[in-house]
Image: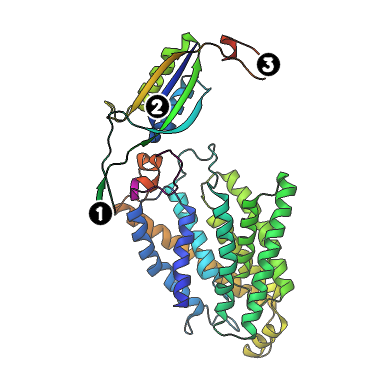
Amino acid sequence: MKLITAIIREVQLDKVREALIEADIKRITVSRVSGHGQQRIEEMYRGQIIVPDLIPKIRIEIGVNDAFVDITVNAILKAARTNGEGNVGDGKIFISPLEECIRIRTGERGGTAI
Amino acid sequence: MFQGKFAIITPALIAGAFAERVNFKAYCFFIAIWSLLVYNPLCHWVWASDGFLFHLGAKGAIDFAGGTVVHISAGVSGLVAALFLGSRRGYPYQVIRPNNMVITMLGAGLLWVGWFGFNAGSSISSGLSTAQALTATQVAAASGALAWILIESMHQGKATALGFASGILAGLVAVTPAAGVVQPYGAMILGFLASFICYSAIQLKNKLGYDDSLDAFGIHGVGGVVGAILLTFLIRPSWMHEAASAAGGKWTLWNQLGVQCLAVTIAIVYAAVMTFIIIYILNKFIKFKSSETDEMAGLDRSYHGERGYGMLNPS
């Protein structure tokens, strides 16, 4: 079992969710985060050029069984990349091993609980 | 200046129908052209001393504070624009709730109090008719709110704050044409009926599936029609006597009903047709609907480079 954490642009959330639902990945957690990698935005605000420090992003967390990792990652990649070849700031996907998954309602553990 | 306030509020109402999917530049042009070509003629017909609706029938078509001029025209124009633009992305299966009920309630409170200026001020005096209009406004708003809560809790099990605000609005809109000519019991009835009919209109909108973002047509359009027509049955006797003497002896409420219906029909048809023409032609020059990427990113960011709401993200 793996935990897939994807950090994407806010604007792409709808597209990524639709792509995931199409790939039959329907269990998801979404949160708002701020951060940046290489991305640096320069904006004009009230006549001055400013550089916002932490940039708002969306974090998606999905727990998947090993068989579904590739499907999920490909769906996210295709949907979260902006304009075909992508731009700096499109985000990252982290895959971490998921030690245990427990369904609270029934107490099931393991792959069937995902 | 006071009448200018009515002129400003009408396009603001229209914006409620197509929130979140209209191009800002196109919208600015639309307001300017719409005010000139739709609002001003309607306003003149109903309120100017040489307007033809002002003289229709014995004492004119009754529109005390702008039921036809403001609410029906805005509601109908909003509907035409909303239908032209199509729905927001994700409507209707994605529920798009108000993001801040506190601000909505604040707004409803502001509207309730502001409407006293709207209706009572339309008496253009400070005397008996002002007090009559004020009372009618208060009673209609309260009865509208109460009616909506009762209807909603019976129909859907829970009375919502948003429904409360909608009920207030429905009552206020319905009493707008009637404020100076109905007695308080009449205002109460208007408020109740307006809530009932507007609630049904919104259910109908859900069934028909078009996207009227803030129910501009559902509440303002329908409420305005309800108020303008049903007030005929609730006019105070002194007004009817004056009308009868102005008409040379006899003026029944059916005569007045004819006058009201004609005024309402003219407002609806004129607003709808002109709005469609304006949008159609404007769309040839500037695309009226926002692009999909702009809409998905949120119009605040795409068109204004601003965030409407802060503190959502650590910074």
Q: Residue at x 67, y 83 (%)?
A: B239
Q: Residue at x 66, y 70 (%)?
A: B138
* For the residues bearing labels 1 and 2, Cβ distance under 8 angstroms: no
Q: Dot 1 lies on which element? A: loop
Determine whether, in the image, residue B253 is placed left or right of residue B90: right
Q: Residue at x 65, y 85 (%)?
A: B128
Can residue B12 be spotted in the picture? yes
Seen in the picture, residue B131 relative to B225 is either above or below; the reply is below
**Residue nearer the viewer, A114 or B226:** A114
**Quarter occupied by residue A102:** top right
Q: Which residue is mark 3?
A: A106
Mark 3, chain letter? A
What kind of residue is marked 3?
Answer: Thr
**Quarter occupied by residue B248:** bottom right
Q: Give percent across and percent down for residue B108.
A: 58, 60
Q: Residue at x 28, y 32 (%)?
A: A39
Mark 1 or 2 closer to N-term?
Answer: 2
Magenta part of the protein: which range?
Answer: B302-315
Q: Dot 3 lies on which element? A: loop
Seen in the picture, residue B64 relative to B270 is either above or below; the reply is below
Q: Which residue is mark 1?
A: A47
Q: Which residue is mark 2?
A: A7
**Quarter occupied by residue B25:** bottom left
What kind of residue is marked 2?
Answer: Ile
